[in-house]
Amino acid sequence: MAELTSSVLAGSLGPAPSSFDVTSAFWLHHTTRLPGADVTYRNYYVLLRVGEVFGACSFESGELDPSYCADTSGLTLDDVLRSDAALPVKIAALDAYLAAVEPHHVSALAEEVVLPAGTPDVRARARDAAVAGLLEVAPGSKVALIGVVNPLVEAITARGGVCLPCDFNLRETASGLPVSRDMTAVVDAADAVVATGMTLSNGSFDVLLDRCRQQEKPLVVYAQTGSAVIRSFLGSGVTALSAEPFPFSQFSSRPSSLYRYHSRTDK
């Protein structure tokens, strides 16, 4: 991540980040409990708008105060990336830059998946099915799931895989599987890895990426957080990506798009 940020600041990946202005900054607290579920998901987001795109990053409760918004609108992305802002704000700025340089909806590498109109559970299941479609699970293989989404647990097991879930905020999955808090132990025990983009915001993405590279394990990422950031690692550690730029599917009942990517030629 440090190398990617340095490349952006040096102008190596496109126009100088000083040429992109943050026109709006906002903070969201969003909760979800689907019908019949016994878990309430609590989500917090940093969002920075730059032109036609939004940079996004999830964060944990108490990690960032909404007052950051007043200090960030009007800055350039260079200002934000060089500042002492909290990590989620910098991830959102990096995401905004990379999405502005190449929006998902114009990328020649992206496969657009249109999620149908419907209720929250209908749209959530369609989204998770699109992510599951990226998985290549051999029967009996162990798949680490970093960031538990219950439909992905189901998708892994339905394909004959053994799910090894890891999450900081859950103790067990809806199906009763114990959830580990030790990411490296789960990755080391797995044959393949599926991870949330929120690994960017908690600082564990570099560790995850290095471990998958060293052990030559496939890494699939599903991302609302830093979807354009994760895209930069396709073919150099990330095998496939489900990128969902803002506005996210849970904020609308109308059709919306996510974008699936497969590895570029290895770098």
Image (cartoon, rainbow, N blue to C red):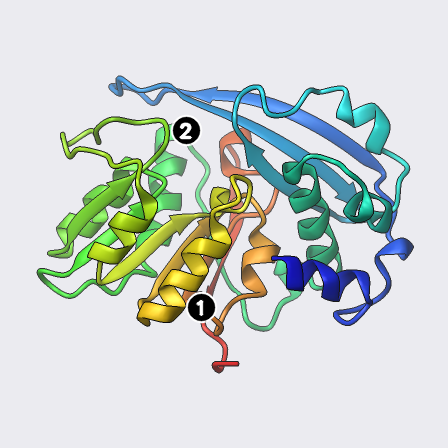
Residue at x 11% of width, y 56% of height: 160
**Left or right: 166, with 12 as reference point:** left
Three-letter residue code for mark 2: Pro
Q: Is 167 placed above or below 95 here?
A: above
Tell me the crowding category of disc 2: few under 14, some 14 to 19, or many 20 or more residues within 10 angstroms, Cα based: some
- The residue under label 2 is 120
Residue at x 35% of width, y 30% of height: 121
Q: In front here: 91 or 265?
A: 91
Q: Which mark is residue 186?
A: none
Query: Looking at the image, can residue 247 be seen?
Result: no
Query: Looking at the image, can residue 122 be seen?
Result: yes
Classify mark 2: helix, strand or loop: helix
Tell me the crowding category of disc 1: few under 14, some 14 to 19, or many 20 or more residues within 10 angstroms, Cα based: many
**Left or right: 22, with 86 as reference point:** right
Which badge, 1 or 2, comes first in the chain's sequence? 2
Q: In front here: 210 or 162?
A: 210
Residue at x 57% of width, y 19% of height: 62
